Amino acid sequence: MNLRKALITGGSGDIGSAICYRLAQQNIHVIVHGNRQIDKALVIVETIKQRGGSAEAIAFDVTDGEETQRLLTELTASEPIQIIVNNAGIHRDAPLAGMNREQWSQVIDVSLNGFYNVTQPLLMPMIRSRWGRIINMSSLAGVMGNRGQANYSAAKSALHGATKALALELASRRITVNAIAPGIIEGSMSQGNFDKELIKKIVPMQRAGTADEVAALAAFLCSDDAAYISGQIININGAMA
């Protein structure tokens, strides 16, 4: 029996790698995407294989629509990718009054256009298989907004609308589409921005979340047990919202 295949974009980051490891434990073949961090993706693949799992690495720029489509078409030539985790994202933080056009466009391009570039070529093979899971990684910034992140908040909020619309389009095909919106999560993205005392003040649970906790939620949404959950924006933020 062939394993289900999952593509995790931004798979070499803290949350992305945690999702890769968790899905591999569920007997899923994991395709670890990296762009500038392909070396880290290869390490993750090797670790998964050492633990008895199945994985491969792939490198491409999610903002390059033509190259992304070409590679993904090759990947699905023989069998579909049935699980997509759109996790690639970047920060270019600045107050909007001082934000240049490049800072605005780069963030929108990765988080929003990247979602289209990756997801659209994989949809017809997934639809023909009549089973699929699509998870779009959002952020608390997309739910509540955040100072200095008008670009990031806009991209993630737009992703919420796309999530709900696509869920409606695919509901009859046994394909679910959901978004996960993490709050403050331990790792390189939050390191240096939030000290423990600040976290205690702003997070009701008085701690940061972990990448493994986010990965556990993602893994559940990818499972057969989550077949009736679709079109949802699921917060994981210690009761911040």
Image: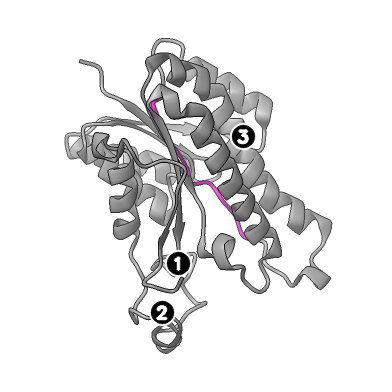
Spatial CA distance of label 2 from label 1 is: 9 Å
- The image position of residue 203, as x and y in percent, is 41, 79
* Residue displayed at 38% across by 39% down: 42
> How would you rate the neighbour count of disc 1 (Cα within 10 Å): few for under 14, some for 14-19, many for 20 or more?
many
Q: Quick check: is 83 in the magenta stretch?
A: yes
What separation in Å lies between label 3 and label 1 (alpha carbons)?
24 Å
Query: Closer to the camera, 35 or 237?
Result: 237
Question: Pointer 1: what residue?
Answer: 183
Q: Nearer the viewer, residue 113 or 173?
A: 173
Could you tell me the amino acid type at mark 3?
Tyr
| Residue 170 or residue 148, whichever sits in front | 170
Q: Quadrant of the N terminus?
A: top left
Residue identifier under label 2: 203
The residue depicted at 27 percent of the width and 37 percent of the height is 223
Q: Marks 2 and 3, Cα distance to the nearest angstrom?
A: 33 Å
Identify residue for label 3: 116
Q: Are marks 2 and 1 in contact (CB under 8 Å)?
A: yes
Q: Which residues are magenta?
A: 82-91
Q: How busy is the neighbourhood of tag 2: few (under 14 within 10 Å), some, or many (20 plus)?
A: some
